[in-house]
Image (cartoon, rainbow, N blue to C red):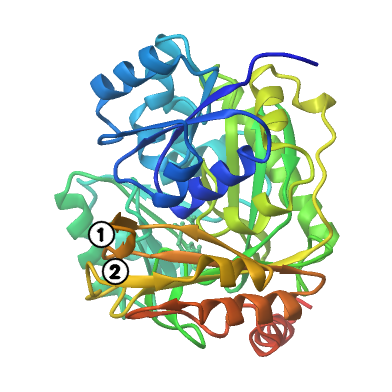
């Protein structure tokens, strides 16, 4: 078919958005990037870029009246929570990404928990919402009822709003003190039962009640090898060639998909708005069965880098079908390959990261190794890549097995020189065995 090239507006500037950009540009289309800072990888793939704060709607309006995109793709959660999709729709631009009311499944933990309860969705965790005027005794009574709890700030907190009892919070007093700290900011707290098990990420394309799943992946939140050190935005992730994980079977993935499908239906019933975008469930296979820990209204970062490079179906076709509400008619295929993603981050990250250091990236060597790379929080100055204080570059190995993909990714990391570090154990046999043994010890496997 001879038609005009699609024009896609991409909002966001991280490695996740670089992965979206690369997957889109495998088709013949024009990409327009709206970014807070210039991601050199995305800029290279774009017809035009606009650098502005993502909530600068004036700049956004100017950009869309200049380029007239066919639709927009919103990468990160903050603009979604703030209603960028509502704004764009008002200006006649449809988006891949939920409207503000539906973005609450990530932006409000209490909204999601109440929704799951009301619509009787499996995978729900025992929980209670406490308002800022709650009495200490009520909190204490609830902790005593559950034994160990997890304390969650209701709103978006960039992964820093969750504390686990026994790990970050020693006893009941510390739990109460943390709740009060959140109350002082005028926000409610969700207390829920602390579960044990293994986590995995299931990212789905959702359009109304139609969902298409992508291969599951496992992220690594801790900064250092052996799951040690502080929590981060994610240090790396892997996925397997059978699109399962060595400790997560097909039956469990089907259960997780069912939870996402029921949630998409419930969201529509509750808000009256179709959900159009990515719905990513953070699941745990726990001693109490499969549980949903959280929803995200976007691809995972790093997990986007595990699934998007495997797409055999053009991403533009999937997004177009979502917008036209024709997702159910589309067959989406992924390569039967394993992936391992390792994030190179500044020394000292996440506590006291080195900033603005030049790094040397031998792109050709990385590609020749069979790996791919995605820029995250870096800038470019006179042809040099410069770090910021956050994750710098994601390297992804793709192969027939996790073991081979890990070797490729590890080798490729040597072609980036500078004051950076990464987790050497992501995707290794030893670490995966640790996950298997953990579930065996818990009598789950
Ligand atoms: P969330 O932002 O809700 O996904 O929480 C961040 C991380 O905290 C999760 O990836 C888990 O590692 C941990 N977590 C959250 N909820 C629970 C829970 N109920 N039990 C145990 N760990 C949890
Ligand atoms: N991988 C964690 C996240 O994207 O939220």
Q: Is residue 436 left or right of residue 75?
A: right
Report which quarter residue 432 is drawn in: bottom right
From the viewer's side, name the closer residue of 385 and 335: 385
Residue 63, percent from left and from top:
34, 21
Badges 1 and 2: C-beta atoms under 8 Å apart?
Answer: yes
Residue furthest to the left in view is 184
Residue at 59% in and 57% down: 305
Q: In this orientation, does residue 364 appear?
A: yes
**Residue 175, numbered label:** 2
Q: Is residue 242 left or right of residue 55?
A: right
Q: Is residue 79 left or right of residue 297?
A: left
Report which quarter residue 169 is drawn in: bottom left
Residue 67, percent from left and from top:
43, 17
**Residue 119, numbered label:** none
**Residue 179, numbered label:** 1
Screen quadrant of the C terminus: bottom right
From the viewer's side, name the closer residue of 119 and 404: 404
Residue 364, percent from left and from top:
57, 66
Residue 153, percent from left and from top:
32, 53
Q: Is residue 414 above or below residue 312?
A: below
Q: Is residue 374 above or below residue 325?
A: below
Residue at 29% in and 41% down: 36
Residue at 36% in and 40% down: 78
- Tell me the CA gap for discs 1 and 2: 6 Å
Mark 1 neighbour class, 10 Å CA radius: few under 14, some 14 to 19, many 20 or more = many
Q: SS class of the residue under badge 1?
A: helix
């Amino acid at each position: 078919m001879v038609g005009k090239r699609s024009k896609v507006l991409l909002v966001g500037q991280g490695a996740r958005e670089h992965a979206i950009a690369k997957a889109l540009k495998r088709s013949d289309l024009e990409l327009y990037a709206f970014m807070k800072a210039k991601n050199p990888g995305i800029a290279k793939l774009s017809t035009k870029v606009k650098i502005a704060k993502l909530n600068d709607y004036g700049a956004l309006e100017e950009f869309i009246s200049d380029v007239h995109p066919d639709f927009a793709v919103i990468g990160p959660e903050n603009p979604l929570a703030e209603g960028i999709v509502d704004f764009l729709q008002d200006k006649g631009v449809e988006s891949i990404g939920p409207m503000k009311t539906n973005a609450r499944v990530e932006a409000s933990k209490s909204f999601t928990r109440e929704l799951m309860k009301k619509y009787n969705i499996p995978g729900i965790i025992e929980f209670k919402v406490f308002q800022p005027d709650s009495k200490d005794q009520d909190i204490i009574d609830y902790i005593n009822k559950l034994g160990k709890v997890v304390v969650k700030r209701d709103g978006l907190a960039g992964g820093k709003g969750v504390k686990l009892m026994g790990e970050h919070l020693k006893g009941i007093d510390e739990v109460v003190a943390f709740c009060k700290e959140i109350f002082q900011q005028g926000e409610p707290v969700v207390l829920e039962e602390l579960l044990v098990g293994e986590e995995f990420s299931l990212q789905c394309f959702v359009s109304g009640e139609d969902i298409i799943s992508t291969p599951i992946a496992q992220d690594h939140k801790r900064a250092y090898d052996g799951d040690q050190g502080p929590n981060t935005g994610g240090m790396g992730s892997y996925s397997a060639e059978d699109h399962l994980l060595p400790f997560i079977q097909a039956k469990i993935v089907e259960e997780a998909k069912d939870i996402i499908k029921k949630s998409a239906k419930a969201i529509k019933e509750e808000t009256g708005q179709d959900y159009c975008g990515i719905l990513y469930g953070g699941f745990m296979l726990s001693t109490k069965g499969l549980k949903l820990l959280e929803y995200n209204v976007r691809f995972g970062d790093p997990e986007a880098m595990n699934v998007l490079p495997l797409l055999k179906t053009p991403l533009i076709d999937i997004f177009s079908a979502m917008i036209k509400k024709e997702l159910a008619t589309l067959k989406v295929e992924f390569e039967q390959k394993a992936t391992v993603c390792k994030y190179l981050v500044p020394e000292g990250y996440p506590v006291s990261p080195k900033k603005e250091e030049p790094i040397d990236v031998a792109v050709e060597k990385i590609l020749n190794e069979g790996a791919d790379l995605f820029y995250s929080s870096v800038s470019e100055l006179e042809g040099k890549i410069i770090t910021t204080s956050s994750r710098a570059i994601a390297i992804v190995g793709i192969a027939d097995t996790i073991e081979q993909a890990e070797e490729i990714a590890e080798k490729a990391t040597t072609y980036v020189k500078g004051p950076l570090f990464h987790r050497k154990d992501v995707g290794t046999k030893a670490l995966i065995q640790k996950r298997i043994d953990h579930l065996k010890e818990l009598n789950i496997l």
